[in-house]
């Protein structure tokens, strides 16, 4: 999907992180900052104050909050039950 027209989507409603329901999606990527830069080229907004150096938040053009984590984050997750 391409967001060429400004205002093509309805404005998002601000949400707090402790609300019930989906507040954000976490995505593991190979390079957090390169991914954020590419997302900004496609209309996302980087949440500068969230940049921890190894992870950060961006907001897509629809207002969805996305957390970018390094791919190595997956290696630290507990094993899935069989």
Image (spheres, rainbow, N blue to C red):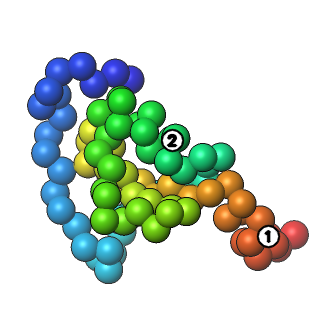
Q: Which residue is mark 1?
A: 80
Residue 49 position, x and y percent, is: 31, 65
Q: Residues within 10 Å of mark 2 (few under 14, many from 20)?
A: some
Position of 77 with respect to 46 (left or right) is: right
Closer to the camera, 16 or 42?
42
Q: Which residue is mark 2?
A: 35
Q: Residue furthest front?
A: 53
Q: Residues within 10 Å of mark 1 (few under 14, many from 20)?
A: few
Element at badge 2?
A: helix
Who's the residue at 44% across and 44% down the image?
36
In the image, residue 13 sits, relative to residue 10, either above or below, namely: below
Residue 56 position, x and y percent, is: 44, 60
In the image, residue 62 sits, relative to residue 82, either above or below, namely: above
In the image, residue 39 sits, relative to residue 6, either above or below, namely: below
Closer to the camera, 35 or 65?
35
Position of 22 with respect to 53 (left or right) is: left
Total numbered badges shown on the rendered structure: 2
Who's the residue at 25% across and 73% down the image?
16
Contact? badges 2 and 1 (CB < 8 Å):
no
Q: Earlier in the sequence, mark 2 or mark 1?
A: 2
Residue 66 position, x and y percent, is: 42, 54
Who's the residue at 55% across and 62% down the image?
54
Position of 69 with respect to 39 (left or right) is: right
Splitting the image into 4 quarters, where does residue 43 fall? top left
Splitting the image into 4 quarters, where does residue 65 fall? bottom left
Q: Residue furthest right?
A: 82
Q: Name the quadrant of the C terminus.
A: bottom right
């Amino acid at each position: 999907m391409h967001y060429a027209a400004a205002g093509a989507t309805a404005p998002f409603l601000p949400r707090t992180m402790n609300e019930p329901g989906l507040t954000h999606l976490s995505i593991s990527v190979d390079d957090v900052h390169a991914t954020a830069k590419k997302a900004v080229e496609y209309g996302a907004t980087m949440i500068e104050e969230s940049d921890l150096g190894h992870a950060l938040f961006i907001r897509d053009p629809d207002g969805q909050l996305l957390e970018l984590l390094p791919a190595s984050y997956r290696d630290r997750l507990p094993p899935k039950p069989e």
